[in-house]
Image: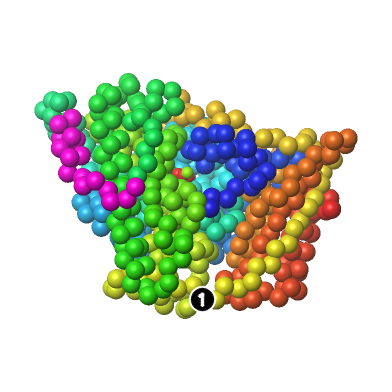
Amino acid sequence: MLQLSTCSRSTFLALPAGIRSLLKPQTLALGRRYRSEDTSRRPLIIDGRSYPTDAWTNIPPPILDHYGRKLHVQPNHPLSITRKLIESCFPEFQHHNALSGVVTVDQNFNSLGFAADHPGRSRTDTYYINKDTLLRTHTSAHEVDVFRSNTSNGYTIAADVYRRDAVDRTHYPAFHQMEGALTWDRNHFKTTDDFLHHLSSALANFKPPNVEVEDANPPFHPERNPPQEKHHSPEEAELVGAHLKRSLEHMVVTIFTEADKALQSSGLELTAEDKDPLKVRWVESFFPHTSPSWEMEVWWRGDWLEVLGCGVIEQPLLIRSDVPSRVGWAFGLGLERLAMLLFGIPDIRLFWSKDSRFLSQFDENKPIRRFQPFSKYPAAPRDVAFWLPKSGPVVAETPAATSTAPSPAGGKQTEPTLDTAPAFHENDLMEVVRSTAGDSVEDVTCIDNFKHPKTGRQSLCYRVTYRSLEKTLTNEEANSLHEQIRQELVTRFGVELR
Ligand code: FA5
Ligand code: MG
């Protein structure tokens, strides 16, 4: 389930999926500034290096505790096993697994053509070390550097990435992505027709996938999902896009096949969910660094789960990377999401577990085995309802969809600016919850959003579901965590508890 707050759901769902994923879940403008977590201006030490901090710094200690665990290369870890399986689908590619998670604003956003006002840049979405340096929010931060090194036609990058994000069983603020790209050098072909012919024959080599694949949209669409007319002929755009989709279908079928074998050999009684055949669908999307763009979703436990974004690489990006004669595709996938499919892992928090009941279940030298959940502890839901402060303007909806448009100044250094209109963002609440209760929280959902007809004041109610993966939380423990969260909301945001 891709859970979003029920608050701005209808407006949000009316937007195309790709734009939805790039937008903030909800912005509530308040009359006061969200207090920065680090006001002491002491340097941050990351990986043994010292970084100056400033008014942009917003990394809480629990996030730094996750930094450096390198789960994607930890032997026998399910993320590492999943990474290797995906790498095996791209045997000719160069595989990068040790790129630093500390990157510049230029690498993470500017080099990819993110617009200056792209919501992803804001402090509500991104963990900043200081105004110029941040914890990468995606593996695409390395695209230009890797293209520039021009050492292979294809590459993958697996790495830990960080985002201030929702709290539920498929989202976590520290997670792992795997990026992949394949480019062809047009100069290696005598004529354009030779290149097109090469692409067509490569396509003919793909076996049809043995899972149901829904693809309702045309290869591109002049308004919704345009080809790069200045740089690519329609045939080229269509063939590169088709090659991308077939390559990723092949990858996901490999995962499904292994998952299915694990399920069949588990000896477990199959549930209705297990028997639900896995299927895939393509939806149109938007990324500043690809066009046309798509997302792949997979039917998982009764809902569509977004597993990756991809598209035909923006040619200006390849030009900036000093490989102007190359044309190709790129994708970025959520490694946890695929590992959840592969092993049947029900909750994303488990990947960080140091509990041997979790870790001992995975062995990279043996066939994939289905994860056997250890006992599920009871859930303790608690609600918190509050009035937003009187002084502030009432709900400001998610930023305009246009702000995700590619920057015309793509690649130019954009000076970041601190948000001038201070806002309480739903992600701020998510962070209060995580910083206070850590992994004892399974889910946070907005269950009521009410505006008083007379006073115009706005009230919100969130349901916080406490459930530890490792023990039963007593009532007292859940109450105490909840009370701390309530008080923190008052202190930080000046809300009035109801
Ligand atoms: C990106 O990050 C793009 N850079 C992907 C890309 C690469 C597009 C190259 C085009 C070319 P997105 O924000 O949708 O896209 O994230 C990619 C995937 O990461 C998602 O499909 C999802 O599987 C996973 N993901 C995103 N947020 C989280 C989260 N909080 N927890 C776990 N997985 C997440
Ligand atoms: Mg997405």
Say if the magenta span includes residue 202.
yes
Q: Residue at x 57, y 50 (%)?
A: 3
| Image position, residue 34 (x, y; %) | 71, 46
Residue occupying the point 76% across, 69% down = 480
Q: Nearer the viewer, residue 372 or 399?
A: 372
Coloring scheme used: rainbow
Mark 1 sits near ligand 1, with its Cβ under 8 Å away: no
Between 364 and 149, the residue placed more toward the observer is 364
Work out which residue is located at the far left of the displayed protein and give it.
190
* 495 relative position to 271: left or right: right
Instruction: Provide the residue designation for mark 1.
Output: 374
What is the count of numbered marks? Answer: 1
Viewer-proximal residue among 246 and 408: 246
Report the residue at 35% width, 63% height from top.
259
Residue appearing at x 32%, y 50% in the figure: 211
- Amino acid at pointer 1: Phe
Q: Is residue 176 left or right of residue 183?
A: right
Q: Identify whether 292 is placed above or below 281.
A: above
Image position of 325 (left or right of 420) = left
Part of the protein shown in magenta: 196-212
Residue 184 visible in image: yes
Which quadrant of the figure has residue 310? top left
Query: 199 above or below 71?
Result: above
Could you say whether the residue bearing mark 1 is in a helix, strand or loop?
Answer: loop
Q: Position of residue 75 (x, y in %)?
A: 35, 70
